[in-house]
Amino acid sequence: MSRRDPFRPTFGASPYFWAGRTLILDRFTDAVEDNPGNPNRSLITDGARGIGKTVLLTELENIATLVDSTIPTRIRELSPPATRTITAVTVGGLGRVDTELLDVPSPTPTLNSRLRELLGLLRGTGVLITVDEVQDADPEALSQLATTYQDLIRDDRQVALVMAGLTHGINRLLDLPGTTFLRRARRFELGPLTDADALATLTTTAADSGRPFDDSSARSAVQLARGYPYLVQLVGYLAWDHTEDAITQDDVAAIAEEAIETMGAQVHAPSLKGVPSAQLAYLRAMADLTEPGRNTVSSTEVAEAVGKKPNQATDTRGKLMDRGLIEAPAWGRVSFTLPYIAEHVRSQGRRTRIS
Ligand SMILES: Nc1ncnc2c1ncn2[C@@H]1O[C@H](COP(=O)(O)OP(=O)(O)OP(=O)(O)O)[C@@H](O)[C@H]1O
Ligand SMILES: [Mg+2]
């Protein structure tokens, strides 16, 4: 029995027990086994902070490296199989092919020439290019990647491309000229985990390490985590840490506040950094107007609360949507993208008044 907490509330850290996202994993598995032309070899996954984009990239890399193995499961291998169909290669900073296979010091290698060089060194295998945090990519570099990739595809080379990033940032980049080709990539927007998937992660991870949830504590933990993958790990982590044997409902209740505060500090605080005061005021008004158990508020009421006519607040609302902080799920309604922003914004307001 493990004495170390098996949950991993850390960005970029793959979970002990993987849950959900099966559609994209299955499509990609088929695609790497198929011919270069398979459209699911070019994927864009997007979604909010902490929704699981980076660990999904890792999972897809694992699929690519395991495709030639006789084991039909996606078990993470310690030593890679001898033959691979596709070698996972991350192109860091977009201009560089980062791999041990390449230590050829050529003067000013272009992405195209280096990838071709790399492909030339491989036999019976190919290259998977993964790009994380695409929303921050230099548009020029992205368009270079698009051109190169299109070129390799046209030549029927064994390449695949998976990109991940925040939804609105990606939309903005894909609107630029030069990235037309990337616009044709299959797009998967990552949403929250289903309750069943969140439950599976929580219960399996805890049980495997000797501190199982019971029925009611598992249900409370699922509710608290709201399907948000980072929170699922965090709630599991804190609950596991709070006991020495089975996890009870009292354990989950006892860590709820800390989970919400940590979410605020780790996720909301960084994404609210540098947000201008008019936008913060809008968020505060939304938080104040959000009734318990309801997700959306009327944008007219929010505008009123910040002392503006609805059309005057449209710009602020649009900017907050661009930042991925709020959404407009229905006409005239707005909601927070991530769970517990309202709580965070309210607690910030309190803190300001005290100081
Ligand atoms: N499918 C999943 N099953 C279980 N846990 C998951 C899953 N996806 C993500 N997680 C957990 O959620 C947390 C956040 O994942 P990840 O770092 O991939 O998010 P992200 O979308 O890349 O965030 P950011 O936008 O900040 O880069 C990690 O702790 C990870 O282990
Ligand atoms: Mg990430």
Image (tube, rainbow, N blue to C red):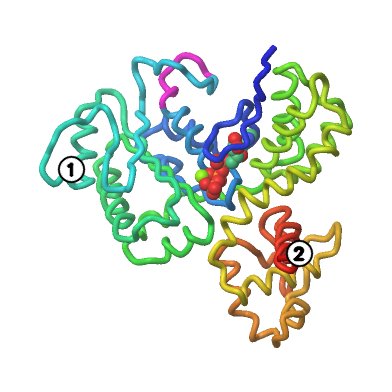
Residue placed under numbered mark 2 in the picture = 350
Which quadrant of the view contains residue 69?
A: top left
Residue at 27 percent across and 27 percent down: it is 100
Whether disc 2's CB lies below 8 Å from ligand 1 is answered no
Query: Reading the chain from its start, which is encountered first: label 2 or label 1?
Result: 1
Where does label 1 land, which residue? 113
Overall secondary structure of the magenta section: loop
- Give residue 318's mark: none
Task: Say which of 127 and 318 sits in front.
Answer: 318
For the residue marked with disc 1, what is the amino acid? Ser
Marks 2 and 1, how far apart in space?
56 Å
Mark 1 element type: helix
Does 244 appear above or below 29? above
Q: Which residues are magenta?
A: 65-72
Residue 39: x %, y % from top left: 43, 44
Quarter of the image that includes the N terminus = top right
Q: Is residue 2 left or right of residue 213?
A: left
Measured as percent of width and height from the top left, residue 172 is found at 46, 64
